[in-house]
Amino acid sequence: MPRGGKRCHKGRGKQFSNPEEIDRQMRQQKELEEKGGAEKESSSDSEEESSSDDESENRKRSGVEGLIEIENPNRVSQKSKKVAELDVTAPRELTRREREEIEKQKSKERYMKLHLEGKTDQAKADLARLAIIKKQREDAAKKRDELRKDKEAEDAKGKR
């Protein structure tokens, strides 16, 4: 038996609509649209002023929605505030990223302050390394001075 089960021609089950049937359906849709447009014109202005919230509450709930009251915070539409209601003087809450960025900068400043004072482990290690390097350089400078003095003394003996 070939893979995938029976082999059959895929186009066999297709049914095509009759062009006369399509024309009849189009006429019915146009008639419904014309009737709906006439009804909208006759409706009063007060119905047009009702908000979309009222429409969503009044619409018929299908299936489980009618039985269970769902409280989904993502579903609630944001109500816009009027300009008069806005309080510009109130402090704006920072986002998580902004708070983390500020904390990061403050901690970096504290660390640099302690580092300059020599209180951090890294600063102590750096100062110890610097002390060792200074001592090595002093020792090397002393050696060079002694070698130069010895060389000058030998040159002075050789010239006599």
Image (spheres, rainbow, N blue to C red):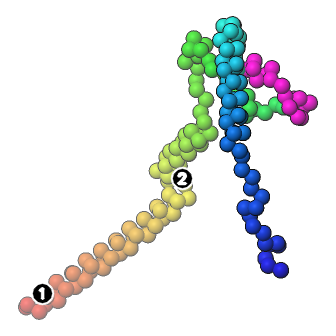
**Badge 2 element:** loop
Residue at 70% of width from left, 19% of height from top?
35
Crowdedness near tag 2: few (<14), some (14–19) or many (≥20) residues, C-alpha within 10 Å: few
Query: Does residue 8 appear left or right of residue 46 in this picture?
Result: right
**Residue 33 at least partly seen:** yes
Q: Is residue 54 magenta?
A: yes
Res 121 quadrant in image: bottom right
Res 10 quadrant in image: bottom right
Residue at 21% of width from left, 81% of height from top?
149
**Residue 49 at least partly seen:** no
Quarter of the image with the C terminus is bottom left
Give the amino acid at mark 2. Answer: Lys
Q: Are marks 1 and 2 in contact (CB under 8 Å)?
A: no
As rendered, which of 120 and 146 lies closer to the eye?
A: 120
Q: Residue 26, relative to residue 13: is it above or below?
A: above
Q: Which residue is mark 2?
A: 119
**Badge 1 element:** helix
Q: Is residue 76 magenta?
A: no
Q: Residue 97, relative to residue 159: is it above or below?
A: above
Residue 156: numbered disc: 1
**Residue 64, image x, y percentages:** 89, 35
As rendered, which of 115 and 50 lies closer to the eye?
A: 50
Give the amino acid at mark 1. Answer: Ala
Crowdedness near tag 1: few (<14), some (14–19) or many (≥20) residues, C-alpha within 10 Å: few
Query: Does residue 64 appear left or right of residue 138 in this picture?
Result: right
Q: Residue 111, relative to residue 95: is it above or below?
A: below
Disc number lying in front (1 or 2):
2
